[in-house]
Every structure is written in C-alpha cells, then in structure tokens.
Amino acid sequence: MDKLQFLVFVSVALFALGLLGVIVRRNLLVMLMCMELMLNGVNLSLVSFAQQTGTASGAVLVFLIFVVAAAEIAVAIPIVLLLVRRKRTLETDAYSDLKG
C-alpha cells in the first residue's frame, strides 16, 4: 500500500467516524465536534490529492474549508449556548419544540 492509498483510507475513516458520530450521538457539542472531524477527513484527502498531482488547488480548497469551519463554529457555539441556557441540557431531543 503506497502513501496516497493510506492517506485516502485514513481520510475516509475520519469522515465515516464523524458521520457515525453525527448520526448516533444526541449531544449538540459532540455533534459539532463530529462535523469538524468530517471536515478534517475531507481536508486530508484534498491535501493528499493535491500533493500527488503537484497543484496548489487542494491547499486553496483546504484554506476555504478552514474559513467556513471557523465561521460555522463562530455561529454555532453561541446558538448552542443560548439553547443550553433555555433548556439546561445539550440533548437534541429536548429541542423538538423548535421544529417548524
């Protein structure tokens, strides 16, 4: 197994682990961390393919994903904190009254 195959396997494993965490867990902060794990899996695959092809487009996309992830966390964490103040729990089942 060469280096590229190993890195792609690790990135798929990271993404799958993050997806499993989002599906299975019901804690809001754990779900946010699992989404970040999914983004890191995508970043690893982008960097490994960019290194293999010798282009800079993968690094540019990784930078864009970092910016989007930072904005996501900057918006999501205050929302989660406001919801926790209101309901006193992080479990998603407690917020079923927010469905529209």
Image: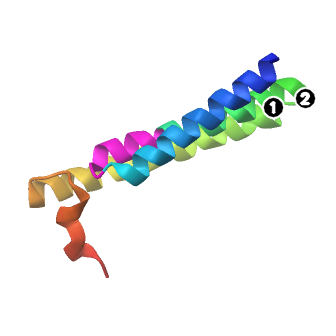
Within 10 Å of disc 2 (Cα), the crowding (few <14, some 14-19, many 20+) is: few
In the image, 58: left or right of 23? Answer: right
From this viewpoint, is residue 96 visible? Answer: yes
Range covered by the magenta-colored residues = 26-36
Question: Is 96 drawn above or below residue 42 in the view shown?
Answer: below
Question: Is residue 22 covered in magenta?
Answer: no
> What number is the disc on residue 49?
1
Quick one: which residue is furthest to the bottom in this view? 100
Where residue 11 appears, x then y in whole percent? 64, 32
Please report the residue visible at 80 percent of the width from the left and 18 percent of the height from the top. Answer: 1
Please report the residue visible at 28 percent of the width from the left and 56 percent of the height from the top. Answer: 79
Amino acid type of the residue that numbered disc 1 sits on in the rendered structure: Phe
Where residue 54 appears, x then y in whole percent? 90, 25
Identify the residue position indicated by label 2 in the image: 53
Please report the residue visible at 10 percent of the width from the left and 60 percent of the height from the top. Answer: 87
Place residue 59 in its image quadrant: top right
Place residue 13 in its image quadrant: top right
Do labels 1 and 2 touch, CB within 8 Å?
yes
Specify the principal SS of the magenta part: helix
Within 10 Å of disc 1 (Cα), the crowding (few <14, some 14-19, many 20+) is: some
